[in-house]
Amino acid sequence: MVQKNHNQPKATEAQFSRGLPVTNEFLKEWRRTAERREIGRKLEEMRRNADLTQHRLAELMGKDQAFVARMESGRGNMPKSENIALFADACGFATAYAFVEIAQDDGLTLHELQPI
């Protein structure tokens, strides 16, 4: 039986439940893809709030159901902004973006485009 280390991020719960080891490589990849997974969760929430199935949303977007599933899964490449806008529009939502300053450890400031 795998013992849970309560110092590990909650993100590893699925690995623990399947008895898979949590490696440094896994944690690094998990952190690297966090934004993509969060976008996927938000897209799925938007679709559900619009009371649409993946299949129906895909029809409205002119895509196939697998395309919608990939966007919601957070796997693969980051969704293109035009596809996010298409998804939102088909759900009855609008998209908006803002530039956000992000302070860095080295004292420099990055500017990032984020949805609002």
Image (cartoon, helix red, strand yellow):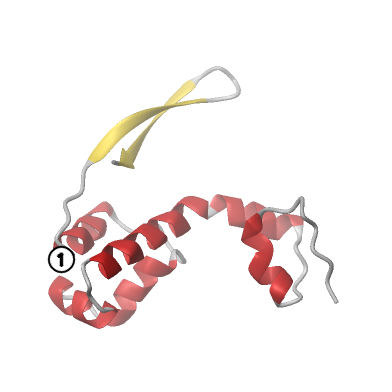
Residue drawn at point x = 71 percent, y = 57 percent = 25
Q: What percent of the width, then of the height, locates residue 29? A: 61, 56
Q: What percent of the width, then of the height, locates residue 33? A: 52, 55
Name the residue carrying label 1: 90
Q: Is residue 92 left or right of residue 39?
A: left
Against 43, residue 115 (above or below) is above
Q: Is residue 44 left or right of residue 19?
A: left
User: In the rendered view of the protein, which quadrant contains the N terminus?
Assistant: bottom right
Q: Is residue 94 left or right of residue 47?
A: left
Amino acid type at circle 1 is Ala
Against 40, residue 114 (above or below) is above
Viewer-closest of 28 and 37: 37
Determine which quarter of the picture holds residue 78.
bottom left
Determine which quarter of the picture holds residue 100.
top left
Residue drawn at point x = 33 percent, y = 40 percent = 114
Q: Secondary structure at mark 1?
A: helix
Against 93, residue 101 (above or below) is above
Against 42, residue 44 (above or below) is below
The residue carrying pointer 1 sits among few (fewer than 14), some (14 to 19) or many (20 or more) residues within 10 Å by Cα, namely: many
